[in-house]
Image (spheres, rainbow, N blue to C red):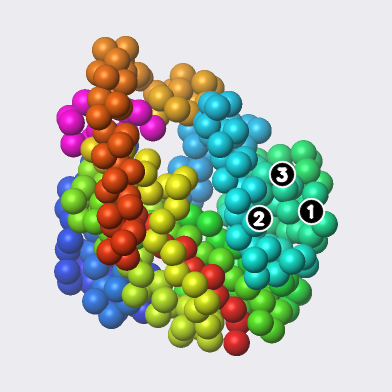
Amino acid sequence: MRYSCNICGKGLEQKILKDIKSNGDYYDIFFCDYCMTGITTPMPEPDEALSLYSSESYRTDTGTRFNPIIEFFIYVFRLKRKGDIKRYIERGSILDIGCGRGLFLHIMKKDGWGTAGVEVNKETAFYASEMYGLNVAVGEPSNWNFPNESFDVITINHVLEHVHKPAEYIKKCKELLKKEGLLFIAVPNISSLQAVVGKELWFHLDVPYHINHFSTAGLLDLLKNNSFKILDIRHFNLEYNPFGWLQTLLNFSGIEKNLFYNSLKNPKIRKTIRLRKGKILLTLALLPLFIPISFILSVAETILKRGGTIEVFAIKE
């Protein structure tokens, strides 16, 4: 079967990874030399993709995904993101695309921002609306119904890799942002050292949830082609990079793919996952060795500008 790029529509010829097993199925990653972006094939159909994010398997009915300790650190990281945004714009209106249960928007709302969100899962969107009183749209860009040029800031934090038509999302952001409005995007980096070393065992590959696999050059071109001016590019994120290395190294150990990550999930979700006690103990025994190595590797790849994540701050010209 011949596959096409999600961004430019050109045929895909270069297969960079093959036979990646996930949920009983096998996937390949093709790379578009024109867009410098990888594409998961076969790509899950829209209805299938929605089922992947059901409350029963992806997050609880309250929107949480991890145990209380990890959720606390997630809250701290969202506070940091608020600080990053306020370096550019002190206060205004913000749209968070892929807002989940609405935690980040809740933090921004308490800081005096006008807030709105987008979420693919209806149950999670309902929770965000009910819990925090947020205006949350559901579905693809054509369903959002926000007025053009109505936001000072739009954030897309580890969401663009999940969508079927990323170029449509960026185009919509351009329409919704005010002149010189700020766009923040974060995605995993398919050209990172941890991706190159980890290959199909790289934690942030995460097929079939991740449909697009961006390189730095590919993401920047997508933004520049939609009239965004790049302000800052970052290759290190404490929330994602060290853990990406840690779980990738654990995957290399042959214990069980993503076992440690799965053990950190909310107890309601863990009930649906078989976690063997012996493998958990072996994982814990390896942590004192792998944790410092993961931080060292994260620093090294950041210095080389090949970090496991890409964060871009850009303004609408």
Q: Is mark 1 in CB contact (under 8 Å) with mark 2? A: yes
| Residue nearest the observer in this picture, 189 or 49 | 189
Name which residue lies at 40% across and 80% down: 221
Quadrant of the image occupied by residue 61? top right
| Residue nearest the observer in this picture, 60 or 228 | 228
Residue 111 image label: 1
Residue 82 image label: 2
Q: CA distance from mark 3 to mark 2?
A: 18 Å
Name which residue lies at 79% across and 53% down: 111
Give coordinates of residue 29: x percent, y percent. 24, 58
Give coordinates of residue 309: x percent, y percent. 39, 57
Q: Is residue 11 above or below residue 260?
A: below
**SS under mark 1:** loop
Q: Is residue 255 visible to the viewer in this orientation of the structure?
A: yes
Q: Is 256 part of what is drawn in magenta? A: yes
* Residue, disc 3: 128
Q: CA distance from mark 1 to mark 3?
A: 17 Å
Q: Is mark 1 in CB contact (under 8 Å) with mark 3? A: no
Tell me: 168 left or right of 308: right
Q: Is residue 235 above or below residue 120?
A: below
**SS under mark 3:** helix
Q: Which range of residues does the magenta coloring cover?
A: 250-261
Q: Earlier in the sequence, mark 1 or mark 3?
A: 1
